Image (cartoon, rainbow, N blue to C red):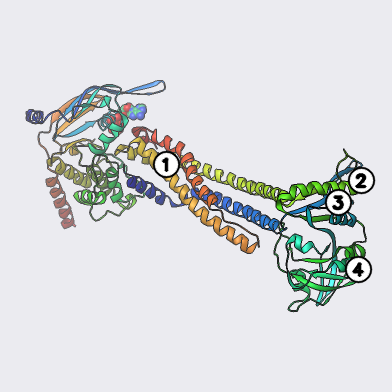
Amino acid sequence: MASEETISNSEAAGAPVIETRNLEKVYSNGEVEVRALRGVDLRIDRGEFVAIMGASGSGKSTLMNILGCLDLPTGGEYLLDGVRVNTLNKNELADIRNAKIGFIFQGFNLLARTSALENVELPLLYNRTRGNVDTSKLAHAALERVGLGERVDHVPSQLSGGQQQRVAIARALVNSPSLILADEPTGNLDSRTSVDVMSLFRELNDQGITIVLVTHEPDIADFTKRIVDVRDGMIRRDVMVANRRDPQVTLRELDRELAGEEDGH
Amino acid sequence: MKWSNILKVALNSILRHRMRSVLTMLGIIIGVGAVIIMVSIGQGVQKQVESQIAGLGSNVLMIFPSATNQGGVSQAAGSRDVLTLDDVDKIKRDATLTANVSPIVRASAQTIGGIGNWSTTIQGVYASYLDIRDWQLATGEFFTDRDLSVRAKVCVIGKTVADNLFPGTDPVGEQLRIRSVPFKIVGVLTEKGQGANGQDQDDIVLAPATTVLDRLSGRRFIQQIVTSSISADQMQAAQVELTTLLREAHHIRPGDDDDFMIRSQTEIADAAASTTQVLTMFLASIAGVSLVVGGIGIMNIMLVSVTERTREIGIRMAIGARSSDVLIQFLVESVVLSVFGGIMGIVLGLGGAELISLVGNMATALNPPVIIAAFIFSAAIGIFFGFYPARKAAALKPIDALRYE
Ligand SMILES: Nc1ncnc2c1ncn2[C@@H]1O[C@H](COP(=O)(O)OP(=O)(O)OP(=O)(O)O)[C@@H](O)[C@H]1O
Ligand SMILES: [Mg+2]
């Protein structure tokens, strides 16, 4: 199996990026208790590209939020780069969110009335580990990297959904994290733009960044290397992608289709 | 987070909500402006009173009829008929610690002369009055003891009277009819300007006390006696001596109350100073209330803005802002707002005070300590009223803040 190769490679590199043991999350609002996660064991190694799939309400976002240190589990253990997250304090968690993890949301979550550049600059302003850096230069570079070098001064309301998601990706990238977590990054985008974004992720993954994303669409999941199926707060299936799609190829196909349609008219 | 970055984040957020920021600042602007204007007015009045009291002359003791309770009806000080020219002459004759003494007999009257008529205050005094008050003559000379003994119809007029009745000419030698009695003008006083209550000190006619009693007031009693003691050290002793002399003159038995009272210039100055200080404090505290209201305005808007910006806080925390970063951002925002408001309030206050002194013809005085205090106070208000909303923002959990709709 292809997975064996990946796992043995990263073991040589040290601890897995993500390791959860019997992870549980219970939401209790007064009398009602929702067991959103019921014992998740997940191990993701450096350089992996994982899609988490599952029905609505199965616990994908809950899992992502815990992996992204935005929320804490109510049971079990989560080790990030070998460090037990449960033992960290609020400030240490904030620093991890800032430097180690780039989180991308379905709703983009950009600051309104704030230019693309300033949005991307934000994580740099909260960075404590770097010394004096030219934040605006780094933010510029990150925007160039996602192909938005021309749009630095636009505010979110002046950008399309795909462009906003690129700004969000640039923001996630700007502190050079080793892990990118994306909760339905293509959920609000049309299929062409979705493939664009996946192509960007593919590029980043090829450069060695570990990527975990949530998606409903099998088409999108096929661009990744591994698919984890979640059902009722538990992992039901964990498989390597047999025929991994190349977003570049898909883009070319889409272009050709478009050209063909135009010829037909 | 570096301070430059904190400031950048706070300033960006203020500029992004311009209207809200201006409204927030308005309370502080008005508060600080009001404090400065009020204190300027109070201090202006205080300065004016001080300079006017200094103009009363040095070592001056004033004698008034005392306030009494006659037949169950209390009467205001100075309204009683007890002082006469005999008292003045007795002091002049017997007092060893008093250098000069003069009565003041007041009458208000219509005067006719020069180009028309003018209604003013007539004061009947002795020749030494000028020395007691330390006043000067612009032209002519003052009347003499001889004028007093013969009840000469001569007078010395103030600048305002001269300007109104004899514009452009020297009034000395001219005639002034006071209640149709013709007086000869022998001198004009130098200009003294406004008095403590804003009254015009130059709107005055001085005439021999004997003449005024005889011709104008038609009474025997005088309203006031002014004396100057021989030196500042002897004020206390002079006051004791005057008391003894007057009790004797008024046949007051030991144990009975005086029917007069003696006030020194310093006592009057102190009383006036404390009155104006109370005025200043009163004005300042009214203005202070508006400053506190401005501070509460800041808190109110910051609280609303924390709720309104919950998602923003969530986003900031999600990308690595610590609670302390959020706390400091909101604190800096409210401090920047209140300090900006404070600066604008100072400008408004200084401009307003200037305008009032120009348009309202009122003295105002700038007070640097008050300006600095108003500034520091507005910054303190920013911290004080910004802290609660800021802490509320910082206490949010990232995931809850992000989920907030
Ligand atoms: N804050 C919360 N309080 C209470 N219950 C919650 C909360 N967040 C999620 N849940 C519940 O936990 C379960 C898992 O929710 P989650 O958002 O993780 O699902 P999901 O897989 O991301 O769904 P979707 O595909 O619709 O985004 C759901 O039953 C949901 O109702
Ligand atoms: Mg979800």
Q: Nearer the viewer, mark 2 or mark 3?
A: 2
| Location of residue B140 in the rendering, given as x and y in whole percent from the top left corner | 77, 74
Rounded to the nearest angstrom, the CA distance separating label 2 from label 1 is 75 Å
Q: Residues within 10 Å of mark 3 (few under 14, many from 20)?
A: some
Rounded to the nearest angstrom, the CA distance separating label 1 from label 4 is 82 Å
Residue drawn at 34 percent across, 23 percent down: A34
Instruction: For the residues labelled 2 and 1, say whether their Cβ atoms are less than 8 Å apart.
Output: no
Q: Tell me which chain the residue with mark 3 is part of.
A: B
Rounded to the nearest angstrom, the CA distance separating label 3 from label 1 is 62 Å
Rounded to the nearest angstrom, the CA distance separating label 4 from label 3 is 29 Å
Rounded to the nearest angstrom, the CA distance separating label 2 from label 4 is 30 Å
Q: Please state which amino acid type lies under the numbered disc 3.
A: Ser
| Location of residue B301 in the rendering, given as x and y in whole percent from the top left corner | 48, 43
Q: Please state which amino acid type lies under the numbered disc 2.
A: His
Q: Tell me which chain the residue with mark 4 is part of.
A: B
Q: Please state which amino acid type lies under the numbered disc 1.
A: Leu
Residue corresponding to mark 1: B331
Residue drawn at 88 percent across, 39 percent down: B254
- Quarter-of-image position of residue B365: bottom right
- Pick the residue in front: A207 or B48: B48
Instruction: For the residues labelled 4 and 3, say whether their Cβ atoms are less than 8 Å apart.
Output: no
Mark 3 lies on a secondary structure that is: loop
Residue corresponding to mark 3: B79
